[in-house]
Structure formats: C-alpha cells, structure tokens
Amino acid sequence: MKNARAWGKRLLWWWFWVTITLLCLAAGLGIWMQHEHLVLNQSTCEPLGLYRLIGNPYPLHDGELVEVELPDPVTHPAVAEGLRDHWFPQNQPWIKQIGALPGQTVTLSRRGVWVDGRYLPNSRVDRRTPGGRNPIIHYPFGTYHLKSGQVWLYAPGNYAFDSSYYGPVSQGHILQAAQPYWIIPGSQFWLRKGD
C-alpha cells in the first residue's frame, strides 16, 4: 500500500513538472515567434507552416503574399457562414496572395478565376465543404473591374477561402507583407477536392 501511494505521488509530481515544462516551452515559443514576427498558418490556403511578417506591403504586386484582416461578416455572407460553421477560427492569421489589383478585370466562374484573361491555377469554386458536409456561399459569378482601393485575394490551395467566396476587399484589410519562413511544401493540397 505504501509503495502504491509513493508511486502515485511520484507520478503526480512527474505529471506536474512535465506540465510546467511544456507550458514554459510553449510560452518561450510564443515569445520567440513574436520577436521574429512569425505567424502560424494552419489553413489549406497556403502551405502549412510559419510565415514572417515583413511590414509595409505597399506598393502591392500580383502574387505577393500578405497577411490580411478578416473581412466584415456583416457585409460578407460567406465570412459569416464560415465563422458560424467553424470552417476557420476567427483569430487565425490569414495569409493570401494578391490576385488582382485596382484597374484589373476579374472573371469568376464555377471553373475558376481569370485576371485580365490569365487563369489563376486551382481556383475552381467549391460548392461544398470537405466531405460534402455543408454548402458554401460564393461570390456571384461574373466579371468585375476592380476599383481604386480594391484587391482580389487569391489562395491556390485546395479548399482555399479567398475572394472567390467573399469578393474583392478594401486595401485597408491588408496588414503586412509576408514571406515563408518554414513551410511544408505542397501541404495546401493534402485535403483532396471532391467533385
């Protein structure tokens, strides 16, 4: 009986110290990431991994990686739907590419996105979430000429949530330029698209 109690006590102390150690490591990792201006992308929009935020993204360029602020769910029904159905966490950083800039023409169809006649790879609009669980609201199909201050956000990954679903956004939603720091190449395609 004494041995069992002594063993239980040791196990409890061991668990306590492991927990404290893991908490300290997590805090240290968070401080290091903040110091290095790193954010973790867990979405299928871009490759999984760490991205360094490198400050002012202006002037913007096609294909440039940026950190963006979540569009307003009140004016973007697809964003409200995604938050309501938990397709993405509200406080996760959004890393996207600049797909089109003011003055460019974007054509959105079920088959994908064209910018000034150039097709954006893997931009097909999905109608349902992975596994076909829920329908997805998308931006109305058509041709759009981007006005001053508007950008079209693009993400090439499978089940990427970009302007194909919520439309063009104000340049004010762009927070910082970003660059890959440590990523898993190809991971944005791991989740297979359905038909």
Image: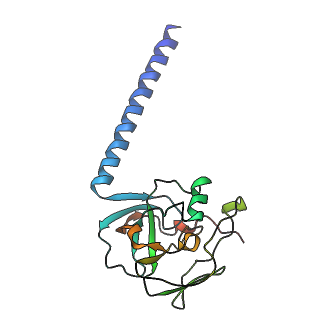
How many numbered marks appear? 0
Q: Position of residue 83 (x, y in %)?
A: 57, 55
Q: What residue appears at the point 42 percent right and 65 percent down from the top-left corner?
A: 68
Residue 135, x across and y down, in percent: 70, 63
Residue drawn where x is 45% and y is 74% of the image: 97
Residue 184: give x, y in percent of width and height: 47, 64
Residue 12: x and y in percent read 46, 22
Residue that extends furthest to the bottom in the rendered view of this protein: 117
Name the side, left or right, on which 66 lies relative to 118: left
Q: Quadrant of residue 166?
A: bottom right
In this rendering, the answer to whether 135 lies above or below 20 is below
- The image shows residue 7, relative to residue 145, as above or below, that is above
Pick the residue in front: 155 or 151: 151
Please state which of residues 141 and 25 is positioned toward the viewer in this rendering. Answer: 141
The quadrant of the image that shows the C terminus is bottom right
Residue at 32 percent of width and 79 percent of height: 59
Tell me where residue 24 sits by quadrant: top left
Determine the residue positioned at 46% across, 53% down: 91
